[in-house]
Image (cartoon, grey):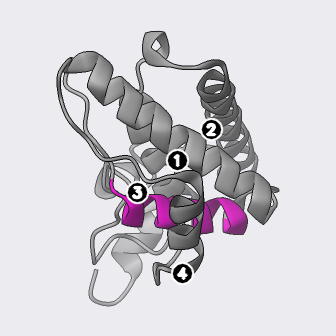
Amino acid sequence: MSIKLFTIPGYVHLYRSLLRFCDIGGREARGLVYSLNTANLDSFCFAKPGAFIREAGYVDFNNALLRMNRRPYRTEVQLYKALAALKRNIIPDALTADQREALASLRCIMRSLEHCFYKAFDVEIYDLLTVYCECTYGLIPQSGEPSVCMAGDWAALPGA
């Protein structure tokens, strides 16, 4: 299994997006994002024994979340796809109890996004009618990603 390591700037996008799109406070979001970061790092080490990685401590990581200038994702679809990428790059067998709790929270947030999206658009968030396929499978969005949730709306925008 190939595990991708995500960088701190990607977690800043994720943190700001959790604040924007989810009913979660700053301290709770920072704790969750830090635990997901360490879960990703531990999963990488689990998949590649002997690999050396440098882990930012809790204080340094949180300072980066608060000080780095990164915008939140534009849409819930971008957030969902980023969460899916992170979930895919975490190995449950490599986790501590705190990290397992964070992974459970990630899954809960994803289910909530799915539910709210379906209620709003009457379509699954990963359906071909959405911009899911146009969003990056990772934590750092690429320039030019859709600013709307539905593919038809995106195609209708000038310059799309």
Mark toward the start of the polypeptide (1 vs 4): 4
Q: Which residue is mark 3?
A: 131
Residue 74 in view in this figure: no
Q: Secondary structure at mark 4?
A: helix
- Could you give the CA–CA distance between mark 1 and mark 3, rounded to whole angstroms? 11 Å
Q: Which residues are magenta?
A: 7-20
Rendered view: 106 above or below 55: above
Mark toward the start of the polypeptide (4 vs 3): 4
As drawn, is 26 to the left or to the right of 46?
A: right
Mark toward the start of the polypeptide (3 vs 2): 2
Given this view, does label 4 or label 3 mark the residue nearer the observer?
4
| Residue 123 percent location from the top left of the image | 59, 42
Q: Which residue is mark 4?
A: 67
Would you say the magenta stretch is mainly helix, strand or loop?
helix
Asked if the residue at tag 4 contacts the one at tag 1, i.e. Cβ–Cβ closer than 8 Å, the answer is no
- Could you give the CA–CA distance between mark 3 and mark 2, rounded to whole angstroms? 16 Å
Mark toward the start of the polypeptide (4 vs 2): 4
Amino acid carrying label 3: it is: Val
Residue count near mark 2 (Cα–Cα under 10 Å), binned few <14, some 14–19, many ≥20? some
| Residue 119 percent location from the top left of the image | 76, 46
Q: Which residue is mark 1?
A: 80
- Could you give the CA–CA distance between mark 4 and mark 3, rounded to whole angstroms? 30 Å
Front residue of 126/72: it is 72
Given this view, does label 3 or label 2 mark the residue nearer the observer?
2
Q: Which residue is mark 2?
A: 110
Q: Secondary structure at mark 2?
A: helix
Q: Secondary structure at mark 1?
A: helix
Asked if the residue at tag 2 contacts the one at tag 1, i.e. Cβ–Cβ closer than 8 Å, the answer is yes
Q: Quadrant of the N terminus?
A: top left
